[in-house]
Amino acid sequence: MKMQVYKSLADCYFQPDEKLVQAVQRINPAIEEWDQDLLEPALEMQKVVESRDKEMLDLKKEYSRLFVGPFELAVPPYGSIYFQHNMQNQQIMDDSAVEAQNAYRKAGVNMSEDFNDPPDHIAVELEFMYYLLYHENQALENKDQASAIDFRTQRLDFLKRHLGLWGPVFADTLFKNTSSDFYRHLARLTKSVILKDKQELGLTRPS
């Protein structure tokens, strides 16, 4: 289902380790339940991570080059960068990051003290979508329509004002700046998931 797709996508944007293999393996059945048109890049990602040792080492090196540094980031994973007119500035923690953090607080989410990145990191925003979907579904199961509508409204607003704006641009930037099969397919899947969800929420028209 869509909820698990967001959670697994978020896990794919952390430092690669054995948990990455598990995250990728969870994506495929979740996508099959939601929209099989999104399945192809996920299957390709699974092929890469199941190659194990050498591929995992290569993924760790590429992850660091893309998202960590030590100097200039090839693909900054922070929304703040993509809301700026000049992405070369790479200034983080601007107003958009503060707005994202405010959205988390409104939903009752506090950032983990162990997480040292800004609040608009791609993994955090994807996991926030998972959180909102989870609580929306829980409310529906409990026949709490008011809460379900509230979480759905928060999800729509967050896509409209944050992740739905910069996420596809980030994904395009990732695709163009890596030769890694895994990260190119991850970029494709990330963009497709965000655009599909925006369409289902009525933020865009079907193509």
Image (spheres, grey):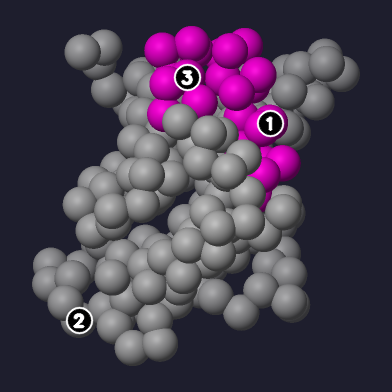
- Residue 185 seen in the figure: yes
Res. 78 image quadrant? bottom left
Marking on residue 26: 1
Write down the residue under mark 2.
89
State whether the magenta stretch is mostly helix, strand or loop: helix
Q: Amino acid at mark 1?
A: Arg
Whole-percent x, y for residue 39 in the image: 47, 19
Q: Amino acid at mark 2?
A: Asn
The residues colored magenta run: 20-43
Nearer to us in this view, 202 or 134? 134
Q: CA separation, marks 3 and 1?
A: 12 Å
At x 43%, y 45%, the residue is 182
Q: Is residue 140 above or below residue 156?
A: above
Q: Residues within 10 Å of mark 1 (few under 14, many from 20)?
A: some
Residue furthest out toward the left: 86
Write down the residue under mark 3.
39
Going from N to C along the chain, the mark reached first, 2 or 1, is: 1
